[in-house]
Image (cartoon, rainbow, N blue to C red):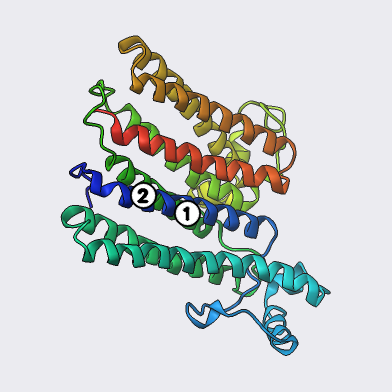
Amino acid sequence: MPLARVPQTRSLSPVRAWIYSLAALVVLMVAVGGATRLTGSGLSITEWRPVTGAIPPLSEQAWLVEFEKYRQISQYELVNKGMTLSEFKFIYGWEWGHRQLGRLIGLVFFLPLVWFWARGVIKGRLALTLLGIGALGGLQGAIGWIMVASGLEPGMTAVAPIKLALHLTVASIILACLVWVAAGLKDRSDEAPEVSTGLAPRILMGLILFQIALGGLVAGSKAGLTYNTWPLMDGALVPSASALFSVSPWIENFVDNVVLVQFNHRLVAYAIVAFAIWHAWTTRRRASGSKAASRATVMAGLTLAQMVLGIVTLLLVVPLWAGLAHQVFAMAVLAMAAVHARVSVA
């Protein structure tokens, strides 16, 4: 659904604050999801119970029942065999917290939406756009369970990389949509007119979304635990074709071959930084001192910082703090890109 500009009135300020609050919760959701993945907790809850699942085990017997369900899957047998109940409670807590946060976001979305709509504060295209984002959020919950279910198959010890990448990408799209809408609600009638920046801000936002999807593949395939050197990979700037396309059929290399998965993530990072620097340079030449030039310069700095953080994360072999920082900072870069794209004049 097109997210067109809506009338900018003072009455929409509370709506704007609410949408930005939702965006912050989505970033928190991504952070908790990243911690859930990095701690190996994502398969600890083996059932999808959207309503009754909100109540965690409340007795020792209930915990033993949940633990027994986990002991039936391959991850326990092949990775965590011998795990204690206390250790299971730790990983269960991460996954339960992730799902609980999803339920909270649903409530924070729909209750104010109904209130604002009933009072006539939001209506028309804005209301339909928000309903579309809400529907995407509901779909995201189903995608999350499909992802988890892929890791519960016999012989699987983790979720399928392509499904993890899809789950992360949809979360990122939801974040970008929320920020896009909120940025369009700000009253800028007293500000100087924006200078034309062409399609570059939107292209940059699209590249960042694409890079996040590639990052999901890196995370899902654990490609960050290999080739922990930079700028070389296995002693070369460009790995050999036999290494990049060792899987048959060749198309599966883009998902299942950790060499190509990591190499693609590196290449797109270089492309994003180069494009952001070029965009900042051209915008500053065309309109030095303008808000568009300032935003473009900030975007160049953010993309460069994110690339450096990614390199540090790779060199340190993805410790928890670095992996989380890289993932959360990607959301910050995307949010800023969405604001820049929204308020810029094509």
Which residue is more in the foreground, 186 or 290? 186
- Asked if the residue at tag 2 contacts the one at tag 1, i.e. Cβ–Cβ closer than 8 Å, the answer is yes
Q: Residue at x 49, y 33 (%)?
A: 268
Locate residue 125, reporting x and y percent.
Answer: 18, 53
**What type is the residue that disc 2 sits on?**
Leu
Q: Position of residue 272 (x, y in %)?
A: 47, 29
- The residue lying at 24 percent from left, 44 percent from top is 10
Residue nearer the viewer, 253 or 91: 91
The residue at which mark 1 appears reads as 26
Number of marks present in the image shown: 2
> Residue 237: horizontal and vertical position, in percent?
63, 26
Position of residue 16 in the picture relative to residue 300 (left or right): left
Instruction: Out of 309 and 31, give the one closest to the viewer.
Output: 31
Q: Quadrant of the C terminus?
A: top left
| Residue of label 2 | 178
Q: Is residue 50 left or right of residue 85?
A: left
Asked if residue 253 can be seen in this view, the reply is: no
Quarter-of-image position of residue 209? top left
Q: What amino acid type is highlighted by mark number 1?
A: Val
1 or 2: tag closer to the N-terminus:
1
**In the picture, residue 93 is in which quadrant?**
bottom right
Percent position of residue 222, x then y: 65, 50
Residue drawn where x is 68% and y is 78% of the image: 70
Among all residues in the image, which is located at the extreme left?
A: 124
Q: Does any portion of residue 194 appear in the rendered image?
A: yes
The secondary element bearing badge 2 is classed as helix
Alpha carbon separation for disc pair 1 and 2:
9 Å
Residue 266's place in the image compared with 178, above or below, is above
Q: Is residue 165 left or right of residue 224?
A: left
